[in-house]
Image (cartoon, grey):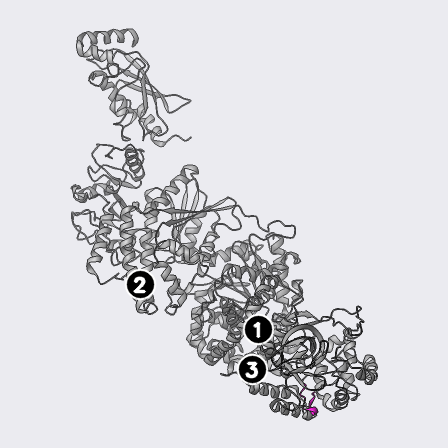
Amino acid sequence: MDFLDDTTRVDEPLNEDELVGIESGFVASEPATSSPPSEPPLFLAESDEEQEIVEIMQPTTSKKQDNTPMKRPSRSPDLEPPTKKRRVSPPAVAKPPFKSKKSDEELSLEEGIYIGEFIVDAYSLTSGHKVMSAGQRVFISRSPSLETSKSNTTIKKGDTKAKGKQTTLTGFVAKSSKESRVSKKPDNIVRFISEHGSQLGRLPVSVAEFIGICLDLKLSVFSGVIVDAPEKIRIGDSIILSVKAYFSPSAFQKPSELHDNESDKIFNEGTETATEKMLRERKESLVKLMDMVGLRPRSTSQLKSERSLEKVKPRSAPRANQKKRIEIIGEGEDMEEVEIDEDDEETLDENDLDLIYKRAQKNDLNLPEMEPVDSFRMTLRPYQKQALQWMKSMEEGLYEARSSRSMHPLWQEYAFPFEPSDDGVIDLSGDERPFYFNPYSGELSLEFPKSTTHSKGGILALRTRRSKIMARQFLAEMGLGKTIQIAALIHTVKASAQDLARRGEKASTESSKPQIKQLSIDRAFRAKVVSRQSNTQSRATLVIVPTSLLSQWAGELQRASKRHTLSTLIWHGSNRAPLSSDLQDVDVVITSYGVLASEHAKQQKSVTSSLFETRWFRIVLDEAHHIKSRISKTAKAAYALDGQRRWVLTGTPIVNRLEDLQSLLHFLQFKPWSEYPFFRSFITIPFLSRDSKALDIVQVILESILLRREKSMKDKEGNPIVSLPAKTVTVETLEFSPLERKIYDQIYHRVKSTFTSLDERGVVGKNWHSLFALLMRLRRAVLHPSLIAAGNSGIDLDADRDGEVDVNDLIAEYMNGSRANGSDGTTSYAQLSVALQKETEQECPICMEICDPPVLSPLCMHSMCMGCITDHLSKCLAKKEEGSCPICRKGPLHVQDLVEVLRTKKAKGSAASDSSPEPEVTRRRSPSHTDEDATMLEQEMIESDGDPDEPMRETSVEVIFRKNNFQSSTKLDALLRDLRRLREQDSTFRAIVFSQFTGFLDLIEIALERDRFPWYRLDGSMDPKARVKALKQFSEPSDKPKVFIISLRAGGVGLNLTSANHVFMIDCWWNSAIEQQAIDRVHRLGQEKEVFVKHYIIAHSVENRILQIQKRKTAIVSFALGKTDSSTSEGIENLRIMFGDDD
Amino acid sequence: MALPKRIIKETERLIADPAPGISAVPHEDNLRYFDVKIDGPSGSPFEGGQFSLELFLPEEYPMSPPKVRFLTKIYHPNIDKLGRICLDILKDKWSPALQIRTVLLSIQALLSAPNPDDPLATDVAKHYKQDERDAQRVSKEWTEKYAK
């Protein structure tokens, strides 16, 4: 109230009284004011004095009223509309009060709402003696003085004068924005002038920048009091000002109509329009202003406090952001097609992810529970009941499901502070009045901005927009019974007649809507729009899962249901029948992503596909990170599905890029975030520039859409929702044997020099593929030298032939055992093999059982079990004796000399093809296996008849002699050692062995075979049937140990392997999350034993480096996938780590 | 502790198809412990005697040799007062391919062919070296005295 002058007061009382009576708040006052034109609060566009006072002022009185309690309640409901009206009215009204004020020189700030005060160190623009004194009131204004600033004044003048004509805010705003734009460069000066209109000084640029815009846009008004000024002042002297800031009513008006379809406008146009710029400036200025006066959101999330330190920093970022955004806009649609965006590495580290989820989980403890219906057979745990209630509510659009008051994600709630009043009367009776601010659009509002994503109200517009988004994302970490929960949902919430009936109607409304959005949407979407018209309704739920989980899902659904209450259909396989006929009696259709994609391809070719011709009651995507790349075919196909309710199940909604989430939102049709450009500009780009707000938004989005369960979570009583047995993870670092080291180093140095030379020439990016292949080769070398034997991957390390030979020689030496002893096995294996073939069972002299697997001593052809003889020889070794044949004592005999005899069905074509037969040569090293799948590595095969050139296809058994030398791979040794130990402790243990390399799986297989471990295998080449069979066999009870070897990529997700409690990770993956997921196959609900996990790492190898990269938390997925465009600096940086020197 | 299949098999075979002059019967309460009887080989000073031995299969068997000891007193350069036997295959020349049967046969053979050059009972060995005939006489006496 500093500004209140006595005179004003005298003049105003009338007004005040009236106002008090009539209006209840500054905004609410509008209607009232508009009718009695004389009184109302005015916009003081102060022009006639030239003195461009941009502030909007109101009679003092109303300001006081603001603080009075009575006004608040009435005003809040309908703030917005009135403001608009008011716009219209002021002009007419404006003059009188303005005049009076003017003459009194007292500008009333009545219309502004006090928001805070700040101190500024300003500069003097005048000189003289006693020009200013402490306590003097000043106006804050854009124009330097009454006459001087033509540019501003004229326009402003125009404004004021024209006010009568200016009926819409937009016009007004647009104009001023233009003006500000024009004048911005030359003039971001904000001055303060004396009550008499003479210029006293200016505010510092840092402040002036945003205050200027606030003034220009009539967002706020300011009044100042000089706190301190030198008595004798010169130009440039510092003056301390205390500035009070007020929001003017117009600030609460929508900046323009534009906001609603902001995305369209922003992204359709290549350049930033004047309006957009205005909006942006408005936003930035408001943010700064609020920061300056110390307004903080009232509803603070946990994040806020943690971030407060950074508060200042992000501020500088937005400008850059904006530029970036413009650029991207420029590229517009192309980007979608061209995938340029992929090269951003907006990866997240774990802390980010934790923060993101934190809010979403905040209120989960108190979710109400719900019992499933009778037809559901299983008993849900409390947290599952909660989830059921939540899902049901979500589907039905009851957004109170979570008790939190969901604000629109972009909005924040603030409270108006009370202004310290002049007259010493502090109105304590007032409530805190909240107001809401959207720091992204710059909008201010007095109404509670509901989270529109939830609004399912009766309004038609909203309904068309949202109602089909019954879709929610529900996610639980693996092993927490997602399947069960979805099953409960399917049972509990069935399609009602209403749902079925309504569909047609909805479909039509929807089909019209998307067109608005089309600019940002790819062709797939258009196709959908067209096809949607004719879609047949179904009451079925469509479940899309990875192929390996098809039958698991079907099984679990059945298990969860009482007999005949749920019919499921697995729609998979090349001879799947068209769906439509079945759908009437089917509750759940389960299909795979593969089918989804191929059906979509069909659909694209305008062959109708029943999958897309059906309007599903509910669609569930399991392991939904399959669609995380929005440009993938699978994702596009998923978007094109037509469903009323949509669910997404995933353990990792954000794998390591925020945009992973976008694709899910797109599928869920969770507007507006489902639109890529929108997501990108409000989330991705801010995140890239380290603006922490991005994470805030993601949090809020997730809060409204995501239910997350983790094994570690606690329920209301503080008990873990799931008590899983302990998990012990150990990492064993192994040392290469000298020869392995030699081989590895050879290859490593070759690869390294290749990289270095490419890097020096700066062409790493171009040679990404080959470098990646070389890396893979290194990683194989770590596992077992034979895996990189010549020709394996078709990549020559170098043109350097000699070197190649060198390595191959080393490998050969390795294959033959480190001791050269090649040629003394002179016995004819061919003859022997005949005998062996007939006499299939030989008793081992040591264990007196059938040799399993049989090996021969090459010296005497005595045969025994591999395990027995190995034991014996190692015993000899321990006694420092030479090993010898236990039967005839012929020696020296070494483990690697042993010849393994394999009897196999002649099924493996690859093995047979490998047998370029050499009659009596028994020791052919064969690193010549050309494909990774060749199971028989380093094998020596002898066809069993006398004429090896003509393999006997008739015999069902073939005998293969293989030198027992591959076992000495360090990793294999370690694995087998541990397995043997396990077997000693527990003869019925179950273990899982993960590796990424099927070639190595082959070797493990052989090693297991040798050690008589019953094993099972699952890899990507197996069809679903075989997988199911392997899984089943593995989980069957038995008194023998069982080992399951699984390709990490095929078995990392979804499988339930709780029958095992030992996990061995043979190699490491770029992204530890993938490993984690694999481990969770075992450590999940249903596991009853303690789980032991062991990683094997070879010291001083590429694996250390991979661990380093993992630790950097910036695992680059694209890198791992070998994408062509992943030649980012990040990727290269990671390569440098790979090839860096050892510390 | 489960009995390895090998031990069971050996036992079965020893009983079903015993080596001539040798019997080995496991204790009922400990199947790794055998009562062994070996007939003195004909043509040796031990002829006509029946010698009792005990044989124990250690945990590591067959990776480690069985432990065998004479219970019957015997005058033999390679067998000491305590009945311990000096035989290479029971020590460093053990091979897992050897069995109870082969061990016992070897012991029987040792009775036929004492080896005083690698003695365990040094006084007996000395005796055998200096006056084999007299030594054999003592062996015979002992056989009469203890092994009948």
CA–CA distance between discs 3 and 1?
A: 24 Å
Residue in the foreground of this view, choosing between A755 and A331: A755
Residue in the foreground of this view, choosing between A124 and A373: A124
Is A377 a magenta residue? no
* Callout 1 and callout 2 share a chain: yes
Residue located 36% across and 50% down the image: A1098
Q: Is residue A406 shown above or below A205?
A: above
Identify residue for label 3: A277
Q: Position of residue A109 (x, y in %)?
A: 73, 80
What amino acid does circle 3 point to? Lys
Residue numbers of the magenta segment:
A45-53
Number of residues whose C-alpha sits closer than 10 Å to that of mark 3, classed few (under 14), some (14–19) or many (20 or more):
some
Label 3 SS: helix
CA–CA distance between discs 2 and 3?
A: 46 Å
Identify residue for label 2: A755
Looking at the rendering, in which quadrant would you find the N terminus of chain B? top left
Q: Position of residue A189 (x, y in %)?
A: 60, 82
Subunit of label 3: A
Label 1 SS: loop
User: Which picture quadrant has residue A15?
Assistant: bottom right
Q: Are discs 3 and 1 less than 8 Å apart at CB?
A: no
Identify residue for label 1: A671
Q: How many marks?
A: 3
